């Protein structure tokens, strides 16, 4: 029996306890279903025909569905049941959540709102990864925006509708616009491919469009061979370099160049958010005097964030640095007044001064890596650059 026949019948029962109702909205192979004993409505997703003769596929599905049912996170719509039905095949049952999908939201969003939602999604994906699962099919229409009242007022919460489990056991393919290059080449879903999909979602939230558009073939080719446009060009307004670098890293063609986990992605996003707040404060403050006249104000801003930061003259001399910077990159209690290349971390980087001078001259930010430390170097004034140092955390 095909589940689509539920729309030509008054009722179809799945698993002996869920009634698919004819008048209910359907998205793909997801149905509203009423539990016959409880009378409560759920979302029932038909996964695939019965795994006849394929015990391994059946075992994998049951193991993944069981793990999914054990997950609990405010940003995840929980799986409450799963099984196999002789008429429709394998199925999963989730809590029924009302709201518009992210694909139906007016986009783009403000930068602050876009990064807030992206952070929520990264938190959910990290939670899934911690339990040994990967999603494999992150996409806008699998995310539902749910209104929530908080002490600060009404806001929308992003909730992930499924874990991509059903997609892995269906014959159709995941959404091509979100596929990492290595998956297009035939690779399996991984943590790195989920990070890539987060980058695509970030691009979508910020610009209102996907990085690549066109036919399926055109999109797949572009995912492998082309660089996505900048957010500034797609959004048609200036964009902070930190945001451009952050999204570009998640969309790197080489999985080794992306954030190494959803937790690392979230860590970098937090750094970007702090940086935006600090830049806003700097731009609204009276900081037009020479750098030595504003050191105290800059130092105060640096100390009020968790970021390791410094202002470095094009000659390499550190004029302002907070304690976090000193702890991360130096072996002295106070690194101000020292040449940056004298610090232990930077002593082995002969090209660092050249990078600093290039950034200061071209007024374009650059990101470089020293082991597990990522340096973001941005223009600060006609005399100096702003450096942020952070660990590229791997959270298991």
Image (cartoon, rainbow, N blue to C red):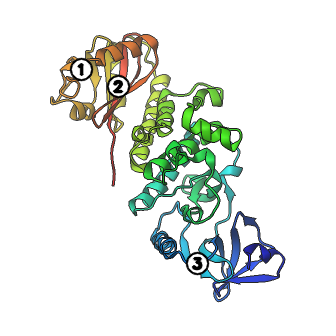
Instruction: Residue 52: give its label.
Output: 3
In this orientation, which residue lies closer to the viewer: 249 or 363?
249
- Residue at point 43% right, 33% down? 275
Q: Residue 89: image x %, image y %?
A: 63, 77
Query: Mark 3 or mark 2: which comes first in sequence?
Result: 3
Q: Label 1: which residue?
A: 340
Residue 368, given in percent of the width and then of the height, sits at 36, 27
- The residue under label 2 is 387
Q: Quadrant of residue 362?
A: top left
The Cα–Cα distance between marks 3 and 2, rounded to whole angstroms, is: 59 Å
Q: Residue at x 34, y 51 (%)?
A: 395
Using residue 317 as the reference point, say whether residue 8 is left or right of it: right
What is the x, y in percent for residue 158? 58, 55
Q: Residues within 10 Å of mark 1 (few under 14, many from 20)?
A: many
Dot 1 and dot 2 residues touching (CB under 8 Å) = yes
Which dot marks residue 180? none
Q: Is residue 209 visible?
A: no
Quadrant of the snapshot with the C terminus: bottom left
- Give the image quarter of residue 301: top left
SS category of the residue bearing label 2 = strand
């Amino acid at each position: 029996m095909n589940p689509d026949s539920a729309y030509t019948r008054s009722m179809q029962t799945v698993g002996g306890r869920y009634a698919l109702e004819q008048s209910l909205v359907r998205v793909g192979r997801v149905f509203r279903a009423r539990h016959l004993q409880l009378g409560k409505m759920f979302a029932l997703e038909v996964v695939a025909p019965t795994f006849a003769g394929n015990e391994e596929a059946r075992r994998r599905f049951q193991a993944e569905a069981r793990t999914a049912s054990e997950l609990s996170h405010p940003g995840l719509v929980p799986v409450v049941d799963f099984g196999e039905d002789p008429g429709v095949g394998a199925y999963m049952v989730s809590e029924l959540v009302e709201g518009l999908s992210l694909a139906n939201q007016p986009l783009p969003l403000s930068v602050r709102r876009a990064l807030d939602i992206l952070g929520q999604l990264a938190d959910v994906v990290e939670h899934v990864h911690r339990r040994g699962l990967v999603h494999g099919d992150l996409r806008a229409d699998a995310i539902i925006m749910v209104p929530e009242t908080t002490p600060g007022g009404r806001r929308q919460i992003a909730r992930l509708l499924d874990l991509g489990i059903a997609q892995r056991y269906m014959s159709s393919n995941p959404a091509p616009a979100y596929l990492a290059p290595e998956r297009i080449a035939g690779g399996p879903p991984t943590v790195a491919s989920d990070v890539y999909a987060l980058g695509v979602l970030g691009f979508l939230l910020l610009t209102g469009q996907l990085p690549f558009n066109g036919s399926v073939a055109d999109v797949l080719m572009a995912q492998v061979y082309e660089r996505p446009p900048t957010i500034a060009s797609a959004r048609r307004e200036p964009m902070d370099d930190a945001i451009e670098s952050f999204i570009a890293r998640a969309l790197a063609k080489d999985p080794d160049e992306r954030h190494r986990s959803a937790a690392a992605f979230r860590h970098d996003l937090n750094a970007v958010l702090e940086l935006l707040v600090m830049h806003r404060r700097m731009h609204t403050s009276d900081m037009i005097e020479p750098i030595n006249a504003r050191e105290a104000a800059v130092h105060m801003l640096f100390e009020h964030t968790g970021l390791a930061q410094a202002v470095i003259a094009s000659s390499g001399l550190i004029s302002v640095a907070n304690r976090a910077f000193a702890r991360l990159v130096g072996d002295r209690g106070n690194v101000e007044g020292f040449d940056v290349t004298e610090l232990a971390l930077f002593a082995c980087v002969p090209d660092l001064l050249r990078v600093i001078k290039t950034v200061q001259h071209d007024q374009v930010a650059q990101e470089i890596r020293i082991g597990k430390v990522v340096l973001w170097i941005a223009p600060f004034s006609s005399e100096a650059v702003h450096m942020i140092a952070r660990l590229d955390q791997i959270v298991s």
